[in-house]
Amino acid sequence: MTAGNAKNAIEIRGLTKSYGRHRGVRDISLEVKEGDIFGFLGPNGAGKSTTIRSMLGLIRFQAGEVRLLGMEAPKQQTEILRQTGYMPSEAMFYPSMRAGDVIRFAARARGMDCAGEAERLCSLLKVDAERRIGELSLGNRKKVSIVCAMQHRPRLLILDEPTSGLDPLMQEVFFELLLEYNRQGATCFLSSHVLPEVKTYCKNAAIIKDGSILRVDTVENLSRSDLRLVRLTEDGEVKEFTWSGRMKELIDTLAGRNVEDLLIGEPSLEELFIHYYEKDSGERKDESADGGHADEGKERELK
């Protein structure tokens, strides 16, 4: 990697972390441009948190290179963390501490006075600074975690499943804040398994499954998949399957069948992962056989 590349906020090459017999991540490589809102998509257990913790030097990885903001991880971990806002997927704090004390503690750990911004964030997110952590719900602990990650106005925000546990109104406030910081120059790395929020707010994204990157592309291109989820009632029986062909071909396929009801919609995120995974595996298998490309299955029945 090129040291100090100002165009990339994140550079990862060949990142590998193994937990022995348990799966970690294998040969992860990706780049995130400065000023981007980058989605890191994957189902639970795909390796998102392992990748993030390795990036930040919170766990040791066996192979690969990581640079954040032009600095090498984990060698320059202290300065990286000073300029980075990290929100873990699970907000864990000392239960006896008050929310305000946790927020001030996070600011002092960076040697910064963040009182003004912390007060603004607490007001927007409706954080009760006097409540003890042990008295807070998951959603309210998440809001404290958001303040801790954002109050020092970091150059890089790394957010692991930030909206889980937040009610819809607070999710909206959170994304307004994310866009505000991004407009002011912050790069955002957003780990999620919620496809709609990634499609709405991210410019580029990577899909990870079973510890490996399946695809890195613009969100527009990733969403351009012709995969559809088809649910039909035929002879009183409900059937579901994914369809990756043209709509005319689907109509021709259903012609003559006793279809009583039909619904065609976007697939779930899990189905999109399976689609990319099967497509990737099929292409590699076919290429190894005759150098060509595998023909995608037009229909894959779910039930």
Image (cartoon, helix red, strand yellow):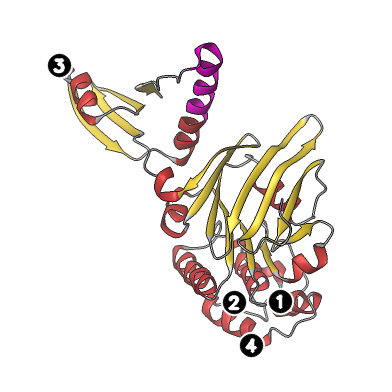
C-alpha distance separating marks 1 and 3: 64 Å
Given the image, on which type of amino acid does mark 1 rest?
Ile
Task: Look at the image and tell me whether residue 161 can be seen.
Answer: no
Q: Is residue 231 above or below residue 85?
A: above
Identify the mark nearer the N-term, 2 or 1. 1
Residue located beneath label 4 in the image: 116
* Residue furthest out toward the bottom: 116
**Mark 2, other Cα within 10 Å: few <14 / some 14–19 / many ≥20:** many
Q: Which residues are magenta?
A: 277-291
Viewport quadrant of the C terminus: top left
Identify the mark nearer the N-term, 2 or 3. 2
Residue at (54%, 24%) from the top-left corner? 281
Secondary structure type for disc 4: helix
Of badges 4 and 1, nearer the viewer stands 4
Identify the mark nearer the N-term, 4 or 3. 4
Residue located beneath label 3 in the image: 256
Relative placement, left or right, of 32 versus 96 is left
C-alpha distance separating marks 4 and 3: 68 Å
C-alpha distance separating marks 2 and 4: 14 Å
